[in-house]
Image (spheres, rainbow, N blue to C red):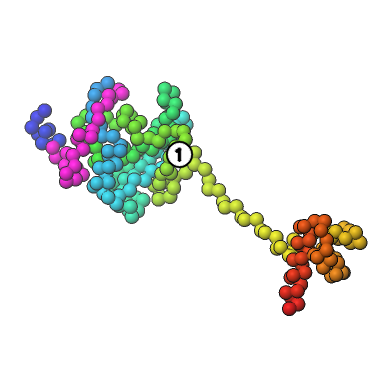
Amino acid sequence: MTNDKQAALAVIQTINAVDGFDPTPLAVEYTDFNEKETRLRLPVMQQLAWFRLKYPEGRVATSVMPAKDCFVATARVYPHYTNPPEQYLAEATVSRGYLPDKPTISPREWAQTAAIGRALQYAGFGLQFSAAGDAFDSPAVDELGGIVWSGDSAPHQPQALDGSIDTGEHAKPPVPPQPKPIEEDPLTKAKGMPCPIAKYSGKTLGEVLEQDQKAIVWVATKFSGDAEISAAAKLICDTAMQESA
């Protein structure tokens, strides 16, 4: 390697420099899918940690859309959470499909993680290793380490590019709150109870009240055939006494 190239690579190493932090020990080896060469790449989780060190109030927004046989994810990196949608450091779009040999991997979450890693790489968080010969046209093995696996653990909903919550194909629409059942007024319910007196068979206590108030008093004080009906008649009597007081 020439001195000029070494000097250029040394300058590249200063991109997004953070005092006391060197990402090089965190880089992992992987084999390029096309050329079968062993290279270095910074895992997505380490990229995110580095990003947080550099921009403590930054944010990463993602959007995932289903396509034919794959999911297409777009990620944007912002230096501050208040930045408007179009004021980002870098943007990347990645597609990932189902892997027959890894059926537990969610292609949707894989695409999202890969897009985040690619956007962070474009923003300079891991670009140093790509400058040494890493290719962008193939997924790296370490991308699989940061995804959410399908199964019982539900992933957190990612934030969409416009700041809203990304729904994606698998997200469920919000369930509107169910209205609480309207409780019937106790007095109205009491008046709707059937009158147990044979003379008033087929009528309710409320109907009998309008014709024969003494009959309601008898049901409240003397009738013992049904405790609920007696209690209803007693409530009717008590209410009438309070209204007349």
The quarter of the picture where residue 35 lies is top left
Residue occupying image coordinates x 26% and y 34%: 42
Which residues lie in the magenta part?
10-34
- Res 104 seen here: yes
Residue 61 at x, y percent in the picture: 36, 46
How many numbered tags mark residues here? 1
Residue found at x 23% / y 33%? 27
From the image, give the main secondary structure of the stretch colored magenta: loop
Q: Is residue 23 magenta?
A: yes
| Quadrant in which the C terminus is drawn | bottom right
Above or below: residue 231 compared with residue 106: below
Q: Which amino acid does label 1 sit on?
A: Ala
Based on the picture, tell me whether residue 11 belongs to the magenta stretch: yes
- Pick whichever, 215 or 97, lies toward us: 215
Q: From the top left corner, tell me how far across and down residue 232 is, in percent.
A: 76, 62
Residue designated by label 1: 154
Looking at the picture, how far across and down is residue 170, in whole percent?
A: 49, 38
- Compared across the picture, whether 27 is left or right of 160 comes to left
Which percent across, then down, holds residue 22? 18, 39
Examine the image and state in which quarter residue 12 appears.
Answer: top left
